[in-house]
Amino acid sequence: MDQPASDEDLMLRYRNGDVRAFENLYARHRGGVFRYVLRQVGFRSAAEEVFQEVWTNIISARARYRVEARFATFLYRVAHNCVIDHFRRKPRLQLIALDDDAEEAMQVPGPHEQQPERAMARRQTAKQLLRALALLPEEQREAFLLHEEGGLTLDEIADVTGVGRETAKSRLRYALAKLRQELGGLGLNHEADVA
Amino acid sequence: MKPMSPEEEELEAQRSRLSGYYRAGSTEEPAAHLDTAILAAARREVALSRFARSWHLPASVAAVLVIGVSLALMTNEIEDSLPPADTPVGTAEQATQAAPAQTMRRKAESRPRSERESRPSRDRSARIDRDADSRQNSAAGKMDAADTPASVAAAVPGPALKQLEGTAPPEAMAERKEGLADAVQEKRAAAQLRKEAAPSSARPTDAPEEWLNRIGELLRDGKTSEAREQLAGFRKRYPDYRLPEALRELEISAKPNPN
């Protein structure tokens, strides 16, 4: 069985004119990048604008692309810069709204959520987690999102955000601690539910 | 990849516990119209670069050709507009005099290169001669005076010679002087031939009738002695021509009386 092509291979193929490779690459990362941007900017309309800008930059960088790091690192660095540019254009709001889609998505039961009570409890926990995430300091939220959505390592998070590895680790530790604290406070910190 | 420290392992364990909750609630996707726009942009970028690549070489070659030809043409025009190296640049009169020389130079340059290179000094002296000729023709009627050796020498611009002496290297100067000497020599010979062939203002190409008419006009203007001279010249060229009555009398009166 053929192993799926790596992101870097797909991007190189796209650089050489293979549009299908880009479609595969986009399908892999579209959700993660969109949620990363959405959680950072807070509103869907703004997120869509930034999301499109991210991919436009990736497409424009096609001819110059060289494999110097994982493609995900390159992609999320571009996304990070686009978010910063967005906040330069539109100052940050104090209140970060939770995206409506998130709440809608939580209404749909997953495959393991057959029992109504457990499903309800899980949705409540996820909703609380997203709220807690929205209230985190920006750097801590970004470290969590880069880890969660982009699958970036500590070194890669440090690279994307332009800080040292220890700083990135510290931000992630604080973020996780605060999120756990929020969930624990509600008495919903049961690992068994998450399986 | 670096091995994780115990602290990092603990961090990873905490994250994985939260990850399930996060993923349960974090299912937002970009809208379909965004997908369409982004994928269309990706295709457009590839199509554009293919188009650019397909035209890259022909466009480059065409650009090089256009620039090369333009430069060659411009260089020729600049060379033509510059005064020739052996023509003095100075007064307006000198510039006017240089114009025919430039024309001759263009004509000479239109000849094959090998021919030009084989006869450089001849070209130069011919050019100088023609230049002098043009000045001479403009002063019609003063031909005789201009044909004296002194005036032929003066036909070569003195300031030009001085200027050249001041700026040109010695070998160029010697070549130039040699060319001038040749020109003067040729001019003297030509003047001598003309003097022998036609007296004073009579033009060798004149028909006998025209010549006689002109002599008649001189008589009417009271220029008898000049008319006699012309008539003598006429007789020299056309000894058997039958003269009109009035001129026959003039001829008779011009002859010395044997008594």
Image (spheres, grey):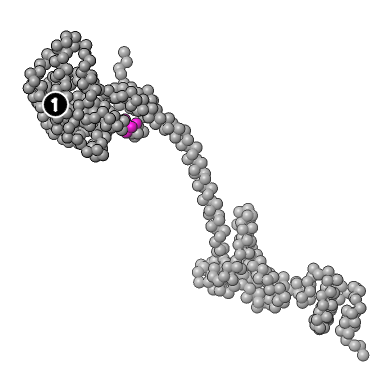
Q: Is residue A14 above or below residue A162?
A: above
Q: Which residues are magenta?
A: A54-59
A55 inside magenta stretch: yes
Q: Residue at x 57, y 58 (%)?
A: B80
The type of residue carrying mark 1 is Ala
Q: Position of residue A57 (x, y in %)?
A: 32, 33
Q: Nearer the viewer, residue A193 or B113?
A: A193
Residue at 31% across, 13% down: A1
Q: In the displayed structure, does residue A42 sit left or right of residue B13?
A: right
Give the answer, above or below, for where B117 lies relative to A21: below
Residue B178 is left or right of residue B211, and the answer is left
Please say whether residue B54 is one of the residues in the magenta stretch.
no
Locate residue B257: give its quadrant: bottom right
Residue A98, compared with residue B213, is above or below; it is above
Quadrant in the rendering for residue A140:
top left
* Residue at the disc numbered 1: A132
Name the residue rendered at 55%, 68% in the picture.
B88
Give coordinates of residue B193: x percent, y percent.
75, 71
